[in-house]
Amino acid sequence: MHIFCPNPDILSLPEYSHGDDAIHYDAIDFSANVNPLGPPAEIVEFIKTLDPVQLRHYPDTGCTRLKEQLSCTHSVPVENIIVGNGSLEVLRLFCQCFLKKGDEVLIPVPTFSEYERMVKLHGGTCTFVEMKNLLIDPHEIIEKIGDLTKVIFLCNPNNPTGFYSEDIMSVVDEAEKRDAIVFLDEAFIDFSCRKSLVQESTPNLFVLKSATKLYAIPALRCGYGFSSKDVIAYMEKVATPWNVNYIAQEAVRRALCNESFIEDTRRFLEREKRYLFSELSKIPYLDPYPSDTNFFLLKTKIQSHRLKKLLLERGVLIRDCSNFRGLDSSYVRLCVKPHEPNEMLVQELRRLHEEPK
């Protein structure tokens, strides 16, 4: 006798699998793509001096002060901003609001696997557009837009490839003509000097950004989205009350006031990325791809799961990319860290080549 009737769409979902397994290992974590500088001083100081009295109250369900600072930082009206308990909650809320059973979405692959998972969770069907040379081709995406296409998911710069696409607005413009909406994930764009589309006023564009990556606070969970006021108002109706805790709201608000933090991060990354790419390129079994963000995708002649295992034995954790749709066991990803850990990583990768097989 069945005591409940599970949703078949949920039963068919792929097993949840990401690169967030650092808590299980005693290793230097090169798998999580967070800012190598760590949280800005404003966040650290706030947490150290946190008034416990604030914990007795519910957080502001409207995230008012944080939205006001986001509005100031990004020059976007407050009514065009939504905040969530991490960017993943914002993604889930978006799918809940704009997808129904049978709707088609376009997803270039390889990319962040949660787009596919959330679409299936909400009854949609996925059409995958395979990237040529791991690059998003806006023209190919436009050609794939059909009568049933409701949403197009794009990540720019893309995870896990690290590449930035210049002509996303051509997709947005065509999607508008076809009554489709573009969900543009810019979680990693602040690590580069590339142009963000946050300030674009096109009504069928939703832009997602993440405090987790930029401010190195994955434990706090805070993400935000930007779109037309009608889209945001619709999503706010469905949002969970008190979804963003007080500590996250105030920590991120304070960090946003530090105008030099992003520039300091970019200067640091420019130097360390140049070092890492140069050194990784010299290792015979590795082929790193150029990157517009704070991580590198590498093609490896050692199977990805084996390379991860060998490095773990040496106290280093990397991301096995074989579970990304469109990639196989020839790919791994690693983030940029401070110089000393980067040197250690390079040394261990060299030793794997030099040691007797």
Image: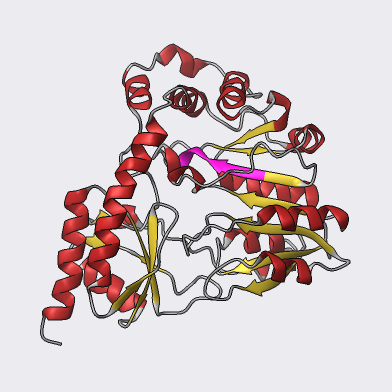
Name the residue located 64 percent from the left edge and 24 percent from the top edge.
61
- Residue 209 included in the magenta stretch of the image: yes
Q: Residue 198 lies in what quarter of the image?
A: top right
What segment carries the magenta color? 207-212
Point out residue 291 in the picture as x, y percentages from the top left corner: 42, 59
Q: Residue 138 lies in what quarter of the image?
A: bottom right
Q: Is residue 192 above or below residue 21?
A: above
Relative side of 12 to 194, left or right = right
Q: Quadrant location of the N terminus? A: bottom right
Point out residue 286 in the picture as x, y percentages from the top left corner: 30, 76
Point out residue 186 in the picture as x, y percentages from the top left corner: 56, 48
Name the residue located 41 percent from the left edge and 35 percent from the top edge.
262
Point out residue 230 in the picture as x, y percentages from the top left corner: 82, 34
Q: Is residue 120 above or below residue 322?
A: above
Residue 143 appears in the figure? yes
The structure's colour scheme is secondary structure
Relative side of 105 to 190, left or right = right
Q: Is residue 103 above or below residue 328?
A: above
Q: Quadrant location of the C terminus? A: bottom left
Relative side of 143 to 26, left or right = right
Q: Nearer the viewer, residue 180 or 142?
A: 142
